[in-house]
Amino acid sequence: MSNLGLVDHSPFNAEPAAPIPTASNLVLIDNYDSFTWNVYQYLCLEGATVTVYRNDEITIDQLIAKNPTQLVISPGPGHPEKDSGVSKDAIRHFAGKIPIFGVCMGEQCIYSVFGGTVEKTGEILHGKTSPLRHDGKGVYANLPQDIPVTRYHSLAGTHPTLPECLEVSSWIAVGPDGGKGVIMGVRHKEYVIEGVQYHPESILTEEGRLQIKN
C-alpha cells in the first residue's frame, strides 16, 4: 500500500516555499490549542523546520539546550499567568537572542513578561472577524488596512499598562476618528519580538500566511 501524503485544499497560497536555512530549528510551544497545528502548517509552508513541544513537556533548561533558531508561542485557553507553562520563561530567556512570535495567548504572554496586564475586554469573541488597523511594519509589511482577522478571545493587554519597551502595532478601530480600541498586536522596540491577539492561521483571516512570512 502506497504512503498517503497530506493534501492541502486551502484556497490561500497553498504552494510551499523553499526551506529556509536560517529557520532550520524553529521551536513552537503548544499551549494545548487545536490551532497550534494550523500555525505549524503555515510555518512549514514558509520553509521553516519546526518542532512542537507542549508547554508542560519541556523545561526551560531543556529548551535552551535545543538551541532554537526562532521561538513561536501558540494560542491556548485560560490566562497567561497560570496556563502557559514554560512559555513565559522561554520568552524571558530568548528575548534579544532569537526572533520570537506569539499568537493569541502567545501575544498575551509577551505582554505579561514585559510588565503589562492582561484582563477581560468586556466582550467574548470566538470565530468572529473584525477589520484590523495596523502600522504597516513588521508582521504588517505590505498589508492593506482593514483586512478581516479572526478573533478567539475574551482577554487582551490593557492600554494603561502597555510596557514602555512595547509599541502597539495593530488594533481594532473605534469611533469616527478610528481611535485605538482593543490591542490586536504588539512589537518590542528593541528586540525582534512581535505578537498578535487574533489568529493569522485561521482561514477567515485575510493574508494570514503573508503575516506569518513577514
Image (cartoon, rainbow, N blue to C red):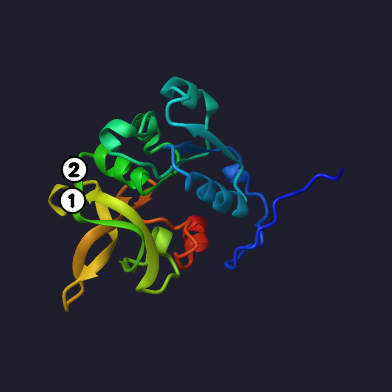
Taking the image as shown, residue 127 lies to the left or right of residue 37, namely left
Given the current orientation, which residue lies at the most extreme left position? 160
Taking the image as shown, residue 181 lies to the left or right of residue 10, namely left
> To which quarter of the image does residue 24 belong?
top right
Q: Residues within 10 Å of mark 2 (few under 14, many from 20)?
A: some
Residue type highlighted by circle 2: Thr
User: Residue at (40%, 63%) from the top-left corner?
Assistant: 140
Residue 69's place in the image compared with 20, above or below, is above
> What is the number of the mark on residue 1?
none
User: Residue at (12%, 51%) from the top-left corner?
Assistant: 160
Q: Are marks 2 and 1 in contact (CB under 8 Å)?
A: yes
Residue 63's place in the image compared with 210, above or below, is above
Q: Quadrant of the N terminus?
A: top right
User: Residue at (34%, 44%) from the top-left corner?
Assistant: 105
Given the current orientation, which residue lies at the most extreme right position? 1
Residue type highlighted by circle 1: Thr
Where does the image place residue 114, in percent across and percent down from the top left?
25, 39
Residue 190's place in the image compared with 144, above or below, is above
Label 1 residue SS: loop
Where does the image place residue 60, in percent across and percent down from the top left?
42, 24
Q: Which residue in the protein does label 1 denote?
A: 158
Query: From mark 2 to mark 1, how far is it between C-alphas?
Result: 6 Å
Where does the image place residue 77, in percent across and percent down from the top left?
35, 41
Name the one closer to the observer, 12 or 45.
Answer: 12
> What is the number of the mark on residue 117?
2
User: Residue at (44%, 22%) from the top-left corner?
Assistant: 59
Q: Residues within 10 Å of mark 1 (few under 14, many from 20)?
A: some
